[in-house]
């Protein structure tokens, strides 16, 4: 009798383990709507702020970026999703191949567009550790207007440019429900006069599950 009980208990425990493995954060054809906030900057911004106090901006590639808006995820598999959306993307950037003198403010000579950004990306939830979230994509940045007035001859609006965001972080969405995500992002941005590489984070404040296949 004890042997039979031991076999039944072992079977129940094994069944529980395998059932747990079958529970995924996401299922094929899941659709999520996420509210996003993000910020990034190039590592040399600290050097820039100290230099501007001497009315000098040293040569280099500088950027400060923000993101706010909505994204939509579609899961092809429980581990692979494709993402798009619509974001407001304030972007302050400057590319200098030599030192610049007699400047009172960084934004006097920087491009300062507020962009309408369309992200196109693919992300994966790492199998077996689905709370790990990683991916990359393409940002289409359409400048709408400049945030500040620059010096004569300085276009604070800038031209259309693209970015290549690379993400790694954490997925807190619960199986069958919604939830947040937090991931770190590095984004090479390709401007007409050079490339900037801001580093920062994206906080998906919440992702609502719009559709889930039963």
Image: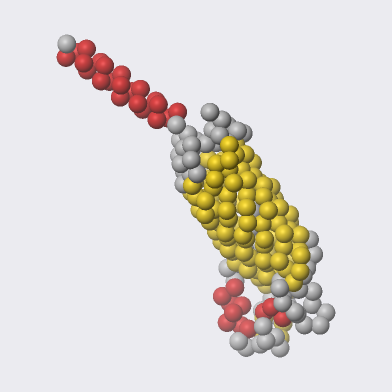
What percent of the width, then of the height, locates residue 173? 48, 44
Image quadrant occupied by the N terminus:
top left
* Picture mark count: 0
Classify residue 160 as left or right of residue 15. right
**Of residues 136 and 213, the one drawn nearer to the viewer in this rendering:** 213
Report the coloring of the rendering: secondary structure
User: Quarter of the image holding residue 17?
Assistant: top left
Judge from the rendering whether residue 94 lies leftward or rightward of residue 73; answer left or right: right
Q: Position of residue 25 (x, y in %)?
A: 48, 37
| Foreground of the two, 50 or 40 | 40
From the viewer's perspective, is 54 left or right of 207?
Answer: right
At 73% across and 68% down in the image, what residue appears? 113
Above/below status of 43 relative to 124: below
- In the image, residue 13 sits, relative to residue 24, either above or below, namely above
Q: x, y percentage for residue 8?
A: 26, 16
Res. 108 image quadrant? bottom right
User: From where the camera sits, is residue 118 visible?
Assistant: yes
Residue closest to the far left: 2
Res. 78 visible in picture: no
Q: Foreground: 30 or 53?
A: 30
* Residue at x 72%, y 62% (from the top left corner): 115
Specify the quadrant of the image occupied by residue 88.
bottom right
Which residue is pictured at 62% across the width and 52% down the height?
70
Relative to residue 53, is residue 94 drawn left or right?
Answer: right
Question: Percent from the top left, x then y, of residue 100?
Answer: 72, 82
Q: Residue at x 58, y 63 (%)?
A: 39
């Amino acid at each position: 009798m004890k042997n039979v009980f031991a076999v039944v208990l072992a079977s129940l425990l094994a069944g529980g383990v395998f059932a747990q493995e079958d529970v995924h954060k996401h299922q094929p054809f899941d659709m999520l709507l996420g509210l996003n906030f993000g910020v990034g900057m190039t590592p040399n911004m600290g050097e820039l702020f100290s230099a501007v106090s001497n009315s000098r901006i040293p040569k280099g590639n500088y950027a400060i970026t923000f993101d706010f808006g909505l994204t939509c995820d579609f899961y092809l598999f429980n581990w692979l999703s494709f993402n798009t959306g619509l974001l407001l993307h304030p972007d302050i950037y400057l590319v200098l191949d030599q030192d610049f003198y007699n400047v009172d403010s960084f934004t006097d000579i920087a491009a300062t567009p507020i962009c309408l950004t369309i992200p196109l990306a693919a992300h994966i939830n790492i199998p077996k550790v689905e709370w790990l979230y990683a991916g990359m994509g393409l940002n289409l940045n359409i400048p709408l207007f400049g945030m500040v007035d620059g010096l004569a001859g300085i276009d604070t609006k800038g031209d259309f440019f693209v970015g290549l965001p690379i993400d790694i972080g954490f997925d807190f969405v619960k199986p069958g429900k919604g939830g947040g995500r937090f991931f770190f992002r590095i984004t090479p941005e390709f401007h007409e006069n050079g490339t900037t590489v801001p580093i920062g984070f994206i906080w998906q404040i919440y992702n609502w599950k719009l559709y889930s296949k039963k």
